[in-house]
Amino acid sequence: MNSQSSRIHWIDIAKGIGILFVCLGHMEELTSPVWKQFGASFHMPLFFILSGILYANKDYREYHFVDFLKKEITKLIIPYILWSFIYCNEINANNVLRIFWGNNKLFGYAGLWFLPVMFVSAIITFFVIKKCKSKGRILIAAVCCFALSWALNLLASVTILARTGYPFGGDIAFTGAGLMCLGYLAKGILEKIASFKSSKAKWIRTISAFLLFIVVFVISRLNYPNVVDSPLGRVVMAAADYGNYILFVMGALIGTLGIILLCQLINQNRILEYIGKNGMLYMVTNHVAIQGIMWIYGRLFTVETITATIIGRVSISLLTLLLVIVFCTVLSYIINRWFPILSGRK
């Protein structure tokens, strides 16, 4: 297996694991607050960092912006608009305006915020890579993106933007771009780590990942007092609720590195790879599955009774996760076969 196929292999697995974290985070009535605070520290930033790693394969200095833009519109914006109208309760002028504003605070259906934010982040990253002539300058640009995102978020808090957010999540997109730039820079180092196949190297990766997750857990607990004003009690990238922004970025980077190290140990997992390759479809459909399953639970038993114990909470969470993945997998197969435009494919 060459480095290229290996790189794509563990990236798909990492995306698959990221989707599992997203689904668990959306099970508001089942998973524990501590778990959700831990997972939310890195599960959305993970996708931006992985996208940056993939971008490192492309010579953007030779890429024409119009071609790049067409590709990103097909992959992200067209599915966003179509899914928005699918989820929209009623097609009217107000909802159309909210859809094209593209911010989670005005149009918070089914995690669709991710698509326009990724679109803007990709454009910012494109120009950073295209214009910066060295890795040092890209790193400086990444830091500037983080600083600008923080400043825009601060500005929004004292204006009407606190209620509406920026168009296409512009402030969040700069955070995404900063993460993508760091992923772009880390590609060579991560590929080097993946090339070490000895038993000793695997043990070192395993222990390192475990230690990194402990650090992320500590960061999530340290950041918790800063996000208690969030309705969900945890960092929410979709709403630019970061708590302490520096702690958020640290948790994002460390947690993502831990996931990547673990994924490099997995030789093959067709299920996780499939989920990773179709991550966008799982991202925008898992809410429906969770709501439907919770409705069924409500007719069969009292959820609060089962989640009163740790064993019960873990068991019902894992069962629900399995059911959600089965539902989304069947739906993704149907969409890819008969409605590929909804998955960003022509």
Image (cartoon, helix red, strand yellow):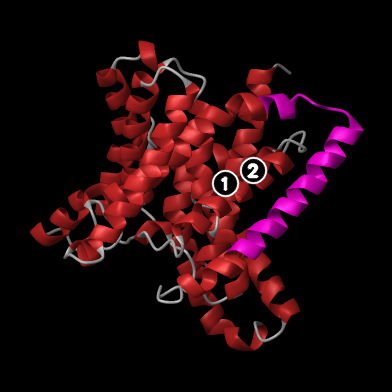
Looking at the image, which residue sits at the far right? 199
> Does residue 147 appear left or right of residue 291 in this picture?
left
- Name the disc covering residue 302, or none: none
Q: Note whether 189 is above or below 285 in the view shown.
A: above
Q: Which residues are magenta?
A: 191-219
Query: Quick check: is 262 in the magenta stretch?
Result: no
Q: Is residue 196 magenta?
A: yes
Secondary element at image label 2: helix
- The image position of residue 205, as x and y in percent, is 79, 40
Instruction: Between residue 42 and residue 279, name the one nearer to us.
Output: 42
Q: Which residue is depicted at the point 43% across and 28% down?
A: 138
From what the image shows, is residue 227 above or below residue 256?
below
In-image side of 21 versus 128 (left or right): right
Q: CA distance from mark 1 to mark 2?
A: 6 Å
Q: Is residue 15 visible?
A: yes
Q: Which of the pair 204/35 is nearer the observer?
A: 204
Dominant SS type (magenta): helix
| Kind of residue at badge 1 | Leu
- Residue 34: where, in percent of width, then height? 61, 72
Left or right: 94 as drawn, with respect to 53: left
Q: Where the N terminus falls, by quadrant?
A: top right
Residue 278 in view: no
Which residue is painted at 21% across and 53% down in the image? 99
Look at label 2 and name its amino acid: Leu
Quadrant that contains the C terminus = top left
Q: Which residue is mark 1?
A: 253
Q: Which residue shows up at 35% across the image and 53% down it?
A: 150
In the image, which disc is placed on residue 257? 2
Q: Nearer the viewer, residue 229 or 278?
A: 229
